Amino acid sequence: MRVGILDLLGPPARRPVDIGYQLLITKQFASITPQAISVWCRRQGHRTFYATYHGLGRPDRLLPADLDVVFISCYTQVSHLAYALAKLYRRAGVRTVIGGPHAKAFPVDCLRFFDLVVRECDAELIADIVAGQFDPGAVISSAQPFDDVPTVEERMPEIRSSAFFFGRKPLPLSAVPMLASMGCPYQCNFCIDWNSTYRPLSTDRLATDLRYLARELPGTVIVFHDPNFAVKFDQIFEVLEAQPPERRPPYIIESSLTVLRGDRPRRLKETNCVMVAPGVESWTDYSNKAGVGRRGGLDKVDRVATHFAQLAENVPYLQANFIFGLDTDQGDEPVELTKAFMDRAPFAWPTINIPVPFGGTPLHDELAANGRILTTMPFSFYYAPYLVTTIKHYDPVTYYDKLVDLYAHAASPAMLRRRLRTTSHRAIGYVHRARTASFRSDVARFRQILGMLRSDPNFLAFHEGRSTALPEYYRHTGERMLGRYAELLSPADRTPDLSPAESSPRQLTIRKR
């Protein structure tokens, strides 16, 4: 069988500024599961073709046209591109399968365009799909996410294709995706992993991969895709610390401040951790992740900033993840507290996310039950700077006003100067400048949306939930995002079906055990 695997990492580049970012950064976002599927199919003797699309070129030309089956993985933001490609493959008689975060969140919508929708998978399920064991129109799943991650050595053809320059030479920012665990012990209501059981993976496999990389790709950055890295801290770090110091590869992680306590920041430094991105999320909620008990407000800001300062002494680059617009956010306080954190910890880059109601999460279910999701908003806008819900304690104009305030503070010349003074790493200085420029671009887009909210009553009515008529701005912008593929999706195709999988008569969940 001729099997294609396509990992969609971003939408087509629309601006010159996007090209460099997508070539150098987005290119490194390749997911592990599509690579694993490619390996599993190759083990079974199939002819496999793997590619990633990071916004440059034509994704319909990345794989051969004469495939028997194609697996497409994508985030919700690029799901319309996946839908358009599925139409092209179906015309050519190719069996189409979608997986990844979007398929897990919105399987019913995916069934409008794909033969099969996969929520979780393992090698056995993939083998049955390729063998044609499932009829079209099914949502299928393995009993749990796979545990047997193929080794880095086995995935090297896919890693070369996704991360190397022209598939041959590593880029300075080339990254190897790895996993040390699956699932997360926390149950954040906005996260698609909220109900996934935390499971450490084989430490023997981790040690094998580290030795291979030290030997074959010394100095190449590892990006651990664990939702919450090293919850079993000592177990993981015994493996990392067992590598000779001069052979320890640089690595990047997402983790919680609760995990990174005591002498653990020092152990991060000794094992060559170069970036940590803890989730702070909110000053009034999720304090269990920040390790501050029930503290909130300015007390929480002080404790979190102090913790970040300890991390900064040991890790070159830090990112603090926030969400603004949760139901616990009211008035000026969330904005002022986040700005206070920026002032106290200028060495930590703040990412400020807009709440997005991904299907299957408690956040989505609560907002849907209360009629607070903008149901006609296309999936292409399920990311910042766009708002796809009504915010509980802010009208749209006030909300975007406060986003402008937050982002403008983070991107101010004074803040950039402070950040540059906190590092002696030239590369990190470039990153700070680049991200500052990106934030300033975001401010411009926020102000554009704010202007339409103030000047266009129909645009405001849509965002207040009083109208379901999609504003022309979103229709036009969605077509620009799709480029040459826009003609493949009608307005009805772009209107999402937000039905839960369990309510659809077309849906059949098959669990392989």
Image (cartoon, rainbow, N blue to C red):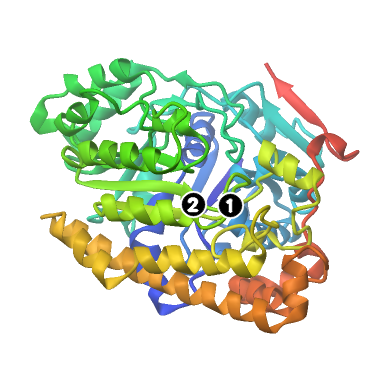
Question: Which quadrant: the C terminus?
Answer: top right
Residue contact between numbered discs 2 and 1, judged by CB atoms under 8 Å: yes
Which sits in the foreground, 73 or 478?
478
| Position of residue 352 in the picture relative to residue 329 (left or right) | left
Q: Secondary structure at mark 2?
A: helix
Which sits in the foreground, 259 or 405?
405
Q: Quadrant of residue 308?
A: top left
Q: Is residue 287 above or below residue 430?
A: above
| Position of residue 437 in the picture relative to residue 83 (left or right) | left
Question: Which quadrant: the N terminus?
Answer: top right
Q: Amino acid at mark 2?
A: Pro
Is the residue marked by circle 2 packed among few (<14), some (14-19), or many (20+) residues within 10 Å?
A: many
**Separation of residues labelled 2 and 1 (CA atoms):** 7 Å
At a point 38% along the width and 30% down the height, the residue shown is 229
Image spot of residue 381 (x, y percent): 63, 63
At a point 55% along the width and 21% down the height, the residue shown is 197
Q: Specify the label residue 330 is tagged with.
A: 1
Q: Is residue 437 above or below residue 115?
A: below
Image spot of residue 57 (x, y percent): 48, 69
Asked if residue 112 shows in the view, the reply is: yes
Is the residue marked by circle 1 packed among few (<14), some (14-19), or many (20+) residues within 10 Å?
A: some
Asked if residue 116 shows in the view, the reply is: no
Q: Secondary structure at mark 1?
A: loop
Image spot of residue 441 (x, y percent): 43, 73
Q: Specify the label residue 55 is tagged with.
A: none
Q: Amino acid at mark 1?
A: Gln
Q: Which residue is mark 2?
A: 334
At a point 39% along the width and 29% down the height, the residue shown is 292
